[in-house]
């Protein structure tokens, strides 16, 4: 699923410069928003598989029987999901941003906001994946559940990466992303583990 996620991110982000044309100012203005939206949908595409394979092969039952706390196991899966999806997206972002004629100084905040924001997408996605595990039409339900929760992450991420905003506003959005991440690291694994226990009963 990682290659599919990365391919979606690259292709979707690359369509906008082709459609808009060689208007450098417009491309620079829309770059943070476009890349954050495509990263968000790429994360949504991969979130459904977070526990799906384990549920299908029976590994999830073994996790529940493990002496290790389920919250720790879930956190490990979230970290693995971010390393193979979110981190890869953040590292690819400067290369994709070249199509938007972004300066190097503007690429750093974009990459930084994605490095801070994509773990949030994985954490929130884990809750949705756990709640919709085994549900018919789970991908649609998953999108309806987690897209509203993704909106604040999108707003803070674009605000932190937007080259048109002041440094103080960018720092404020980075701080909000960091604070939200701290809360999510504590809350989301616990909520996901509780949802998995309910789903397996």
Image (tube, rainbow, N blue to C red):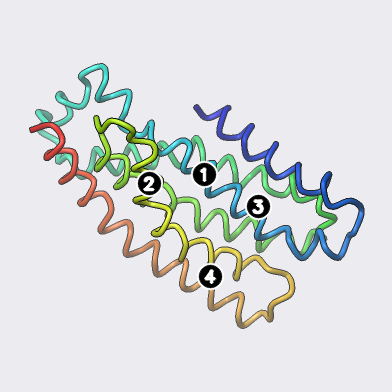
Quadrant (top left/top right/bottom left/bottom right) for the C terminus: top left
Q: Secondary structure at mark 2?
A: helix
Q: Which residue is mark 1?
A: 86
Packing grade of label 3 (10 A; few <14, some 14-19, many >=20) is many
Residue 120 image offset from top left, x and y in percent: 42, 55
Q: Earlier in the sequence, mark 2 or mark 1?
A: 1
Task: Say what secondary structure mark 3 lies in.
Answer: helix
Q: How many marks?
A: 4
User: Disc 4, disc 3: CB below 8 Å?
Assistant: no
- As drawn, 146 above or below 1: below
Numbered badge on residue 35: 3
- Give the mark, 1 or 4, whose residue is nearer the N terminus: 1
Residue shown at 28% from the left, 30% from the top: 136
Whole-percent x, y for residue 95 in the image = 75, 44
The secondary element bearing badge 1 is classed as helix
Disc on res. 125: 2
How far apart are labels 1 and 4 at the CA level?
Answer: 17 Å
Q: Is residue 5 above or below residue 120?
A: above
Which numbered mark, 4 or 2, is in the foreground of this view? 2
Q: Is the residue 176 above or below the residue 121 in the image?
A: below
Q: Residues within 10 Å of mark 1 (few under 14, many from 20)?
A: many
Distance Cα–Cα, label 4 vs label 2: 21 Å
Where does label 4 land, which residue? Answer: 174
């Amino acid at each position: 699923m990682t290659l599919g996620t990365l391919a979606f991110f690259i292709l979707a982000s690359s369509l906008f410069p082709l459609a808009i044309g060689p208007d450098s100012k417009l491309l620079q203005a829309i770059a943070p928003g476009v890349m954050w939206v495509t990263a968000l949908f790429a994360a949504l595409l991969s979130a459904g598989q977070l526990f799906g394979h384990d549920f299908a092969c029976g590994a999830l039952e073994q996790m529940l029987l493990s002496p290790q706390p389920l919250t720790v196991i879930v956190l490990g899966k979230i970290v693995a999901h971010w390393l193979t999806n979110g981190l890869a997206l953040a590292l690819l972002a400067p290369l994709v941003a070249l199509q938007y004629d972004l300066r190097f100084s503007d690429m750093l905040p974009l990459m930084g906001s994605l490095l801070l924001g994509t773990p949030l997408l994985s954490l929130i996605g884990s809750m949705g994946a756990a709640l919709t595990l085994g549900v018919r039409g789970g991908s649609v339900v998953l999108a309806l559940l987690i897209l509203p929760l993704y909106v604040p992450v999108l707003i803070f991420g674009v605000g932190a990466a937007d080259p048109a905003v002041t440094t103080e506003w960018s720092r404020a959005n980075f701080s909000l992303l960091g604070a939200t991440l701290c809360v999510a690291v504590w809350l989301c694994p616990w909520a996901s583990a509780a949802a998995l226990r309910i789903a397996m009963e």
